């Protein structure tokens, strides 16, 4: 069983373990369509009721797959994103999406752009409802220090107005940001009433900087957190990438120490990585991105692996986990 937790005043409940559907759209390497569809079905069969997607993922491919999987299923909670419109025509540079559909993403954080994105997502999904809309990749990490501030202003004025209007009308239940940097979330708190932020890769066993500023600000504002990228793009699950690039030696050394401590307690490092994220009181869901039913099966095993309190104490004593980072109190996860 996977527990559910409520999101602020929205009336929504998210399963504490969710599914991120970016990888299913073929990031860096293809994912056979049968595997993608089987993974989505296996997730629902396992009790995972929260799925996150975006127009950008596979340039519409992820939304098509997710919509097909959820159609006719009343029990899901679905989030997708706004900030990019898809124009017909294959992108000159599809980037990481090796099986992208023949569309080109174009940034648009305006009021009209957000409204058009919402309607287009409903059509790609083939669904009559989306529960959560995140404003996607808004910040200097994506756009650079020259273009970023101007786009941020457009997003916080026009884009936010559209999101808030959709929420007030009941067309969606919750709004937020879906980003890979904490700074833009902190800045957005000064410009609106946000239900939750999807923060990818910035609160993990390897990174806890949000404890210093973002999380206290979110607690004061009543904004909840969803954790994406709990494995930092692979390094915490035995991969050779950190944030989709090479693994710095400082990170590799910490991972080696963590692995040794986990091995001493007979706990796989990915199990500790997953269960660490859920311990912070603001976190409503953690959404890894499996590419196949077998990867999902591993994630479910790690999620349910008993983790003794002594493991967390040893990680902190070794200096590889912050002393003030909240950790799970129970030895097992329901």
Image: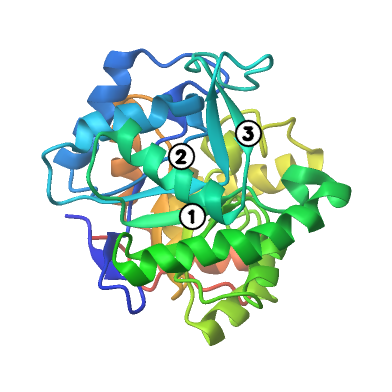
Quadrant for the C terminus in the image: bottom left
* Residue 249 seen in this snapshot: yes
Q: Which residue is mark 3?
A: 106
Q: How many marks?
A: 3
The reply to whether callout 1 and callout 2 are in contact (CB within 8 Å) is yes
Please identify the quarter of the rendering in which residue 191 is found: bottom right
Residue shown at the point (38%, 43%) measured from the top left: 119
Please identify the quarter of the rendering in which residue 159 is found: bottom right
In the rendered image of this protein, does residue 90 appear above or below residue 85? above
In the rendered structure, the answer to whether residue 286 lies left or right of residue 9 reads right
Please identify the quarter of the rendering in which residue 156 is found: bottom right
Report, in whole angstroms, how far the alpha carbon at label 1 lies from the one at label 3.
16 Å
State which tag comes first along the sequence, 1 or 2. 2
Residue 105 in the image: state x and y as whole percent.
59, 30
State which tag comes first along the sequence, 1 or 3. 3
- Front residue (pair 52, 167): 167
Residue shown at the point (62%, 44%) measured from the top left: 108
Q: Which residue is mark 1?
A: 134
Residue shown at the point (57%, 39%) measured from the top left: 84
Assess disc 3: are there few (<14), some (14-19) or many (≥20) residues with their C-alpha within 10 Å of its C-alpha: some
- Front residue (pair 219, 235): 219
Q: Which residue is mark 2?
A: 54
Assess disc 1: are there few (<14), some (14-19) or many (≥20) residues with their C-alpha within 10 Å of its C-alpha: many
In the rendered structure, the answer to whether residue 41 lies left or right of residue 61 reads left
Residue found at the very far front of the displayed protein: 112
């Amino acid at each position: 069983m996977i527990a559910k937790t409520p999101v602020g005043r929205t009336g929504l409940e998210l399963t504490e373990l969710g599914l991120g559907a970016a990888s299913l759209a073929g990031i860096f390497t293809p994912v056979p369509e049968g595997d993608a569809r089987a993974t989505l079905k296996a997730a629902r069969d396992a009790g995972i009721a929260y799925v996150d997607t975006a127009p950008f993922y596979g340039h519409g491919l992820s939304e098509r797959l997710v919509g097909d999987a959820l159609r006719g299923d009343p029990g899901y909670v679905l989030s997708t994103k706004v900030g990019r419109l898809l124009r017909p025509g294959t992108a000159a540079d599809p980037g990481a999406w090796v099986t992208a559909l023949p569309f080109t993403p174009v940034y648009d954080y305006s009021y009209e752009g957000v409204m058009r994105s919402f309607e287009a997502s409903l059509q790609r999904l083939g669904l009559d409802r989306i529960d959560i809309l995140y404003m996607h990749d808004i910040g200097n990490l994506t756009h650079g220090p020259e273009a970023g501030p101007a786009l941020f202003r457009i997003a916080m004025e026009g884009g936010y107005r559209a999101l808030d209007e959709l929420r007030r009308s009941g067309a969606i239940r919750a709004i937020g940001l879906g980003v890979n940097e904490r700074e833009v979330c902190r800045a957005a708190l000064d410009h609106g009433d946000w239900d939750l932020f999807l923060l990818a890769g910035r609160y993990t066993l390897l990174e806890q900087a949000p404890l210093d500023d973002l999380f206290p600000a979110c607690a004061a504002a009543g904004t909840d957190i969803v954790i994406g990228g709990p494995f930092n793009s692979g390094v915490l699950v035995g991969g050779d990438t950190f944030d989709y690039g090479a693994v710095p030696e400082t990170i590799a050394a910490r991972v080696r120490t963590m692995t040794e401590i986990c091995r001493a307690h007979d706990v796989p490092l990915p199990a500790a990585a997953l269960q660490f994220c859920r311990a912070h009181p603001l976190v409503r869901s953690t959404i890894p991105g499996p590419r196949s039913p077998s990867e999902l099966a591993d994630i479910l095993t790690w999620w349910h692996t008993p983790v003794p309190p002594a493991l967390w104490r040893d990680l902190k004593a070794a200096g590889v986990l912050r002393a003030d980072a909240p950790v799970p109190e129970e030895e097992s996860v329901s």
